[in-house]
Amino acid sequence: AEFMAQGRLAPHIRRMRTEYAARRAALLVALARHCPSVEALAAPGGLHLVARLADTADEAAIVRAARARDLGVASLGAYFSGAARMRGLVIGFAGPPVAVATEAPRRLARAVG
């Protein structure tokens, strides 16, 4: 309550929006460079990125391999009600700094194979 009463919430939100946008941009650039078989789907906001995998990809195996490399990814199929309509990953980028967001796709490329 004091944080808000002191007028610090709005500047904090602006600062974090800028930071998260930088992390997302760094992740998108690194994914395009290191994981060309992974297609990042456009979404202008949020703290997660959806990345489409090839229809022939083994989503569960890729998620296991990514997690073994300390990457915080989830199966996109888990977000569908009923049968999954596409294979992919949900990648969070709010936690790691920009440097990690640019390095993580290298590890993901090894997980994707």
Image: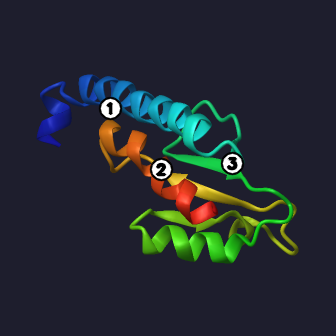
Comparing 44 with 14, the one in front is 44
- For label 2, count other residues whose C-alpha is less than 10 Å away and answer few (under 14), some (14-19) or many (20+): some
Q: Amino acid at mark 1?
A: Met
Q: Residue at x 39, y 67 (%)?
A: 70
Q: Which mark is residue 106?
A: 2
Mark 3 to mark 1: distance in Å?
A: 27 Å
Disc 3: which residue: 38
Q: Earlier in the sequence, mark 3 or mark 2?
A: 3
Instruction: Check disc 3 and report its element: helix, strand or loop.
Output: loop
Q: Earlier in the sequence, mark 3 or mark 1?
A: 1
Q: Amino acid at mark 3?
A: Val
Q: Is residue 26 left or right of residue 35?
A: left
Q: Amino acid at mark 2?
A: Arg
Mark 1 to mark 2: distance in Å?
A: 25 Å
- For label 3, count other residues whose C-alpha is less than 10 Å away and answer few (under 14), some (14-19) or many (20+): many
Coordinates of residue 59 in the picture (x, y in percent):
71, 70
- Of tags 1 and 2, which is closer to the observer? 2
| Image marks 1 and 2: residues in contact by CB distance under 8 Å | no
Whether 85 is drawn above or below 35: the answer is below
Q: Which mark is residue 16?
A: 1
Q: Earlier in the sequence, mark 1 or mark 2?
A: 1
Coordinates of residue 1 in the picture (x, y in percent):
17, 43
Whether 85 is drawn above or below 49: the answer is below
> Image quarter for residue 28?
top right
Q: Residue at x 55, y 77 (%)?
A: 64
Whether 41 is drawn above or below 26: the answer is below
Instruction: Check disc 2 and report its element: helix, strand or loop.
Output: helix
Coordinates of residue 40 in the picture (x, y in percent):
67, 41
